[in-house]
Image: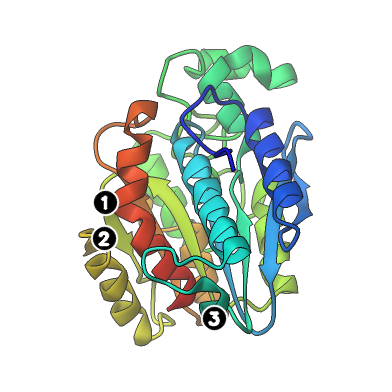
């Protein structure tokens, strides 16, 4: 069959259409509503399997990291093709490996931010003027959602410390990047993931970001002891480095909140190397290097 997920022109709408196409092609995938963005764009997931051993994989928290959405969908496509045809993927018999397991993929957490990053401030509707003033028409700059909130700083994990760090760095409000918002979970995109995790007791979660070829696994005293081993296995499958975020990236993230809330493993994977946004011409190279690691992250 013709490959659906390939290097191509991107918008949030195209990403969502490709999600629908994957679910139409592989009937064991099911599209489910997760929530809506500030501007009402859909945030949807792909559900496969189920049960207590279900893992959540998310992507595109940041507007200029839109390639992570396509990497997430390419993984879905190759897993779907492998299971449909009964052929191995990277040596894995996925029909057997996913027996009794489940995955929910949410490839586009920040559809408004992706639209702004790709098509500029005009896509921000009533927030267009503020987005433009904050640099929304500068290529590669936009990270936040339409209200100027960095979604991966908006989760309730060390939020007071994060706000203090923001103030020390001169970040006090609406911004292209790194403002955590007025209070934790202030944004509908953030709350969509919080409600999903409250509804489904995930075994662990994986958040795809770019760039740096690093795997972050630790946050606070509730980090499970097994998390370091899991991260090391993923690193061995990819050549990535096991690391720890610093500075403004130290609090408020999705995996931080999940670890602190549940005491279960959570991981941030920084895909690729270079400067965001990673060039679309590097998509295949980034994906090929990460594929084994991404499969392992769902099954470990």
Task: Quickly name the residue at label 3.
Answer: 96
Quick one: SS at disc 3? helix
Task: Write down the quadrant of residue 55 in the picture.
Answer: bottom right
Q: Quadrant of the N terminus?
A: top right
Position of 155 relative to 11 (above/below): below
Instruction: Give the residue number, with chain letter if any, for mark 1.
Output: 213
The answer to whether residue 215 is visible is: yes
Q: Residue at x 71, y 35 (%)?
A: 17
Of residue 234 and residue 200, the one placed in the foreground of this image is 234
Label 2 and label 1: CA atoms lie apart by 9 Å
Q: Left or right: where does residue 158 sit relative to residue 121?
A: left
Are the residues tagged 2 and 3 within 8 Å (C-beta)?
no
Quadrant of residue 239 within the rendered picture: bottom left
Residue 187 visible in the shown view: no
Residue that badge 2 annotates:
238
Q: Position of residue 96 (x, y in %)?
A: 54, 81
Foreground: 61 or 45? 45
- What is the x, y in percent for residue 205? 52, 68
């Amino acid at each position: 069959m013709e490959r659906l997920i390939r290097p191509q022109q991107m918008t949030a709408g195209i990403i969502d259409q490709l999600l629908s196409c994957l679910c139409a092609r592989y009937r064991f995938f099911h599209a489910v509503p997760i929530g809506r963005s500030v501007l009402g764009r859909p945030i949807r997931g792909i559900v496969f399997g189920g049960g207590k051993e279900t893992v959540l994989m998310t992507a595109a928290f940041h507007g200029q990291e839109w390639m992570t959405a396509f990497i997430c969908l390419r993984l879905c496509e190759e897993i779907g093709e492998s299971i449909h045809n009964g052929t191995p993927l990277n040596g894995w018999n996925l029909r057997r490996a996913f027996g009794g397991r489940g995955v929910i993929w949410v490839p586009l957490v920040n559809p408004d931010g992706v639209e702004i990053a790709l098509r500029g401030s005009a896509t921000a509707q009533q927030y267009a003027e503020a987005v433009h003033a904050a640099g929304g028409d500068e290529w590669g700059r936009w990270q936040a959602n339409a209200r100027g909130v960095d979604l991966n700083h908006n989760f309730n994990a060390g939020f007071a410390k994060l706000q203090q760090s923001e103030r020390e760095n001169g970040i006090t409000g609406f911004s292209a990047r790194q403002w955590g918002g007025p209070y934790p979970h202030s944004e509908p995109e953030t709350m969509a993931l919080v409600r999903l995790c409250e509804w489904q007791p995930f075994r662990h979660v994986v958040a795809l970001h770019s760039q740096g070829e690093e795997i972050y696994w630790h946050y606070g005293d509730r980090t499970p002891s097994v998390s370091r081993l899991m991260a090391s296995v993923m690193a061995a499958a990819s050549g990535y480095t096991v690391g720890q975020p610093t500075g403004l990236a130290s609090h408020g993230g999705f995996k931080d909140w999940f670890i602190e809330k549940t005491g279960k493993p959570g991981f941030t994977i920084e895909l690729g190397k270079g400067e965001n946004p990673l060039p679309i011409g590097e998509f295949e190279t980034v994906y090929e290097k990460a594929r084994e690691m991404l499969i392992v992250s769902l099954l470990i």
